[in-house]
Image: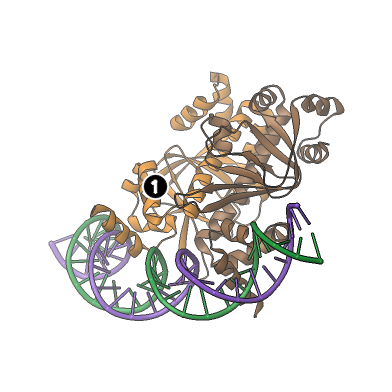
Chain colours: A orange, B brown, C purple, D green
Amino acid sequence: MYKLFFQHLNSKVQLTEEEEAHIKTYLTLKKLRKKQYLLQEGDVCKAIAFVEKGALRAYSVDENSNEHIIQFGLEGWTISDLYSFLTGEPATYNIDALEDSELVLISKSAHEELLQTMPKYETFTRLNITGAYLAMQRRLTSIISASVEERYQDFIALYPHIAQRVPQHMIASYMGLTPETLSRIRKRISSK
Amino acid sequence: MYKLFFQHLNSKVQLTEEEEAHIKTYLTLKKLRKKQYLLQEGDVCKAIAFVEKGALRAYSVDENSNEHIIQFGLEGWTISDLYSFLTGEPATYNIDALEDSELVLISKSAHEELLQTMPKYETFTRLNITGAYLAMQRRLTSIISASVEERYQDFIALYPHIAQRVPQHMIASYMGLTPETLSRIRKRISSK
DNA sequence: CTAAAGCATTGATTTGGATCAATGTTCTTT
DNA sequence: AAAGAACATTGATCCAAATCAATGCTTTAG
């Protein structure tokens, strides 16, 4: 339990045993069965979730009730509706489990207290959000400037483990495409 | 000079006079004439730029030499190729001035030293990148799920000052559209 | 073990935005 | 103030992806 979480933490800021133990008192565990929600649109996002095991997705639903996947969260990733978490506004995203999953939750108050009292936690948070920012910028750049075919190839190259575990129509959704289009893209690629 | 920069800094983390003075020793000023480059693709991004005055853009150029605007930077915003800045890899973006501009530059070594020695600077950095992350997530969500028409209306509502100062074809580029398409969208909207 | 649900593929058609091209308009620069 | 450059608009055509629809395949639940 918490193993992966602390592995990550330690890879960014070296912690003593005591520090680990101290942080641990702020964390809670949560198991989620496949298809269960971690967060529903309209609710306030009460915690940031670190994925110890399993896979989740964050998605929004538009007026035609099409789902649009904003983010996947596999082992080692963090998932939340950060805007809702930070502001207390109702969430605009849904988050649910694509597989049975185990999460490490950090509540708002835990997060704030750790930020205030543990410089290393703040550093960890800063590095985390920086990584997330860079990943999203890469995604945005490729949406704006690359062809759909390239984008799919890049996705596969960058996240092969996601492509293996997640149904294809969700990858289509993540890319902003219909499942039919992605199917045809794949065909086109494989016939080369 | 540095006025807006410290205003921003102070709005996020309250600084003493001494702290301000200390930080000031790490900063440099730079003026840029319209059309001048702050950064060219291939060079390493040596500094983060805070815009005191003026307007800049970061953009990438694809294989067909189409420009794609990644980000605008107006007064109070920070602009850089963050990936290049942090890793030392060659930049993939170009940054140039849309108007005569005044920048506050923070070099890599200054940034690192301030992070190490001034907790408040780290907090400022964390809050900044968090804000940038949230802004980009909003943009990405709207690209994936909204119609082009909505996206334009949202852009105008969110960044009216940009729309006023920047040529329309650059807004088209920022939205991933051709100038012709944006022109027609505007026509459609105004005829309602 | 079987029915049903979920998923991927393929085809036909439609559509929104790109591209190509021309014209008018508004800034810049001298 | 004039000339040129940069920019915006409009029209015609083309194309990539969406939509609508049907079929087979695979996973899941009872």
Front residue (pair A81, A39): A81
Please identify the quadrant where the N terminus of chain B is shown.
top right
Image side of residue B54 versus residue B138, left or right: right
Front residue (pair B61, D3): D3
- Residue neighbourhood size for the residue with mark 1, other residues' Cα within 10 Å, grouped as few (<14), some (14–19), many (≥20): some
Task: Tell me residue B188's x, y (percent).
Answer: 60, 76
Front residue (pair D5, A101): D5
Image side of residue B124 versus residue A144, left or right: right
Image side of residue B53 versus residue A11, left or right: right
Please identify the quadrant where the C terminus of chain B is shown.
bottom right
Please, which chain is the residue tagged with disc 1 on?
Answer: A
In the displayed structure, would residue C29 be above or below residue A5?
A: below
**Among all residues in the image, which is located at the extreme right?**
B17
Give the amino acid at mark 1: Phe
In the displayed structure, would residue A21 be above or below residue B48?
A: above
Give the secondary structure at mark 1.
Answer: helix
Front residue (pair A17, B162): B162
Q: Residue at x 78, y 24 (%)?
A: B25
In the displayed structure, would residue D19 be above or below residue D5?
A: below
Task: Tell me residue B115's x, y (percent).
Answer: 67, 26
Q: Residue at x 67, y 43 (%)?
A: B36
Residue A22 appears in which quarter of the rendering? top right
Q: Which residue is mark 1?
A: A155
Is residue B132 visible in this depiction of the protein? yes
Query: Number of labelled discs?
Result: 1
Is residue A1 visible in this depiction of the protein? no
Residue B121 appears in which quarter of the rendering? top right
Q: Residue at x 84, y 29 (%)?
A: B16
Task: Tell me residue A149's x, y (percent).
Answer: 36, 54
Task: Tell me residue B169's x, y (percent).
Answer: 61, 61
Residue A184 appears in which quarter of the rendering? bottom left
